[in-house]
């Protein structure tokens, strides 16, 4: 009888130890999931992620709660929750944005970049992922690299108003005022209501509405028939920073993409 009780206690402690390892180490958690199967968040080719609803219910919202608890341990837990989703759905936009937030709070931006690289590698035709990647660089104080990501987003989706807005901000930070103004005029012509970009251009004396926004700059002109296809279903709720140098945490003031 006594030996049976000890065996049960041993098994119980072993189970708790395994659970603790999975919570503390996202890498170990991924190793327990199994083969590297993954799904496109947008369900292109008629294959929708079969676990999307349960993953968001059981992991996304819990990860967000952990993220805003404040302690470092809870931040680590949040990464594990977001990683579970990104393992199966690498281009899940909300999970990508949240893991970026966790990474910056942990002062480990490379952690988020690894997830972004995997997302664009597996699904290179997703405009929203490049948009989010651009925001990552923008927040990391690298507007030159942000430009490259925003351009990629626009080459895939020419009607992406938020990408025009953020690209204008990046060029403004780089003091390339003519380009900043053109992209600003374009996003406002498309209906953007955010005043921050215009205010910054006016303050710099570079606001000029007398530009022709019907002729696209060469850098965003698609180069293949595939890129010319508008991928409206590829859009996510994207966050648009009002200013790059002092932008708020992405999860605090989300600006949803209405299309």
Image (cartoon, grey):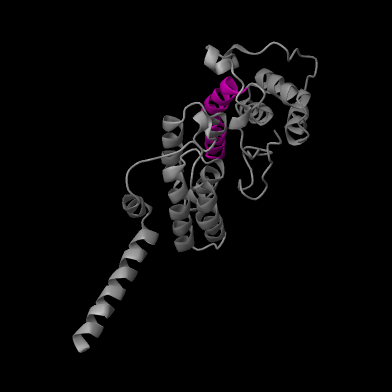
The answer to which quarter of the image holds residue 64 is bottom right
Residue 4 shows in the view: yes
Side (left or right) of 150 relative to 9: right
Quadrant in which residue 152 is drawn: top right
Query: In the orientation shown, which residue stands out farthest toward the right?
Result: 210
The residue closer to the viewer here, 108 or 73, is: 73
Number of numbered discs overlaid on the protein picture? 0
Residue found at the very far bottom of the displayed protein:
1
Residue under the image location 32 percent in, 48 percent down:
34
Residue extent of the magenta highlight: 131-157
* Residue visible at 68% across and 36% down in the picture: 257
Q: In the image, 74: left or right of 24? A: right
Identify whether 247 is placed above or below 56: above
| Vertical side of 213 occupied by 37: above or below | below
Give the quadrant of the C terminus: top right
Query: Residue at position x 41%, y 39% from top?
Result: 38
Q: Nearer the viewer, residue 165 or 119?
A: 119
User: Is residue 117 shown left or right of residue 93?
Assistant: left
Residue 175 colored magenta? Answer: no
| Main secondary structure found in the magenta portion | helix
- Give the left or right position of residue 185, taking residue 129 as reference: right
Q: Could you say where residue 160 lies in the image, as x and y percent from the top left?
A: 65, 27
Q: Is residue 223 visible?
A: no
Image coords of residue 94 (percent x, y): 56, 44
Residue 120 rendering spot, x and y as whole percentages = 46, 31
Please tell me whether residue 147 belongs to the stretch shown in magenta. yes
Q: Quadrant of the N terminus?
A: bottom left
* 51, 138: nearer the viewer: 51
């Amino acid at each position: 009888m006594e030996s049976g009780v000890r065996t049960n206690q041993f098994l119980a402690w072993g189970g708790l130890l395994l659970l603790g390892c999975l919570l503390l180490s996202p890498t170990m958690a991924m190793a327990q999931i199994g083969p590297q199967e993954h799904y496109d968040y947008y369900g292109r080719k008629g294959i929708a992620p079969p676990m999307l609803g349960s993953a968001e219910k059981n992991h996304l919202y819990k990860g967000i709660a952990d993220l805003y608890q404040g302690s470092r341990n809870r931040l680590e837990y949040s990464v594990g929750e977001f990683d579970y989703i990104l393992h199966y759905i690498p281009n899940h936009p909300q999970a990508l944005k949240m893991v970026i937030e966790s990474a910056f709070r942990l002062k480990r931006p490379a952690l988020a970049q690894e997830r972004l690289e995997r997302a664009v590698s597996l699904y290179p035709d997703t405009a929203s992922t490049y948009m989010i990647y651009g925001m990552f660089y923008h927040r990391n104080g690298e507007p030159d690299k942000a430009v490259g990501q925003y351009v990629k987003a626009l080459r895939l989706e020419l009607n992406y108003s938020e990408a025009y807005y953020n690209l204008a901000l990046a060029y403004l930070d780089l003091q390339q005022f003519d380009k900043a103004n053109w992209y600003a005029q374009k996003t406002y012509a498309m209906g953007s209501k955010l005043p921050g970009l215009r205010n910054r251009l006016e303050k710099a004396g570079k606001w000029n509405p007398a530009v022709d926004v019907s002729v696209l700059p060469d850098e965003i002109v698609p180069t293949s028939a595939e890129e010319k296809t508008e991928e409206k279903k590829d859009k996510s709720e994207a966050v648009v920073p009002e200013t790059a140098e002092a932008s708020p945490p992405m999860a605090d003031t989300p600006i949803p993409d209405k299309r």
